[in-house]
Image: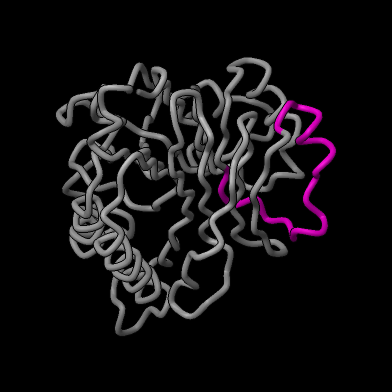
Amino acid sequence: MRLVTWNINSLRLRMPLLEKLTTTLQPDVICLQETKVTDELFPLDAVRALGFEHLHYKGMKSYNGVAILSRLPLSAATDTPIWYGKEDCRHVGATIHAPGGDIALHDFYVPAGGDEPDPAINPKFAHKLAFVEEVTNWFAHQKPNRTVLVGDFNIAPLEHDVWNHKQLLKIVSHTPPETERLTNWQQTGFVDAMRHFVPPQDKLYTWWSYRNRDWRKSNRGRRLDHIWVTPDLVPQLAGMNVVQDARDWPSPSDHVPVVMDFLPLS
């Protein structure tokens, strides 16, 4: 099974890029974030024309939005919480009926948190911290197994997940309150599948700001996009690829797709 996670930054605007991704990589499942489209305007026919017959999505106008596109049959999860008391379309879950057995799949778009890393004066940052805490508490009571958790978490937790650790310690996405909470979430029963293939001491990024005109030369990136798996799926991890070339596609997202290959489940 080939799984992709990607903050597409507007699905309808970037349908040609989704087609390019699908043609190039032939994924079985794609998890999208920031689809920015209401459910009634979701480009259903165009997505199905790419081969994804099985869909679960939740969206709103201009902001947020998450979607699971699958060639494999899926059953949508209907019991996921409304996080932080807001139905702002940041999480969808499903059971993927994969060869060898079912897997649970969760697709998250964690709040970005604004610019000021102080919850007392920045409601967006307070929302972000509380969101991660709520999700952590929920998973702590789930005791997950055969589960994959993906998405744009808007947090780069490790030193080499950012281009300059010391400089970004006071920048939202890499501050200690965020990274500590993300670590707590991961410790509810997950393994960082990307770092299974790339050691923590090596640089690993999935996002480059639109402000960086020559993003490759400056390489001021952050790893905001993640794939976690429960320990029982680690033996099935077969390969990982951060599709950096997608950052140079026409009218790109500032995030690039991350690909994870799984051996047949047993």
The tally of labels here is: 0
For this view, does 200 lie left or right of residue 210? left
* Residue 150 picture quarter: top left
* Residue stretch rendered in magenta on the structure: 32-52
Query: Residue 75 placed where, x, y %?
Result: 59, 47
Write the residue at 73% across / 26% down: 51
Write the residue at 69% across / 22% down: 20
Query: Residue 147 placed where, x, y %?
Result: 37, 42
* Residue 32 picture quarter: top right
For this view, does 156 lie left or right of residue 21? left
Residue 151 in sight: yes
Write the residue at 63% across / 25% down: 249
Which quadrant holds the C terminus? top left
Against 138, is 207 above or below? above
> Is residue 45 part of the magenta span, yes or no?
yes
For this view, does 34 lie left or right of residue 198? right
* Residue 193 picture quarter: top left
Against 197, is 212 above or below? below
Query: Residue 172 placed where, x, y %?
Result: 33, 60
> Is residue 2 part of the magenta span, yes or no?
no
Against 39, is 86 above or below? below
Front in this rendered view, residue 39 or 118: 39
Name, please, the residue furthest toward the bottom: 120
Query: Residue 130 placed where, x, y %?
Result: 33, 73
Residue 254 in sight: no
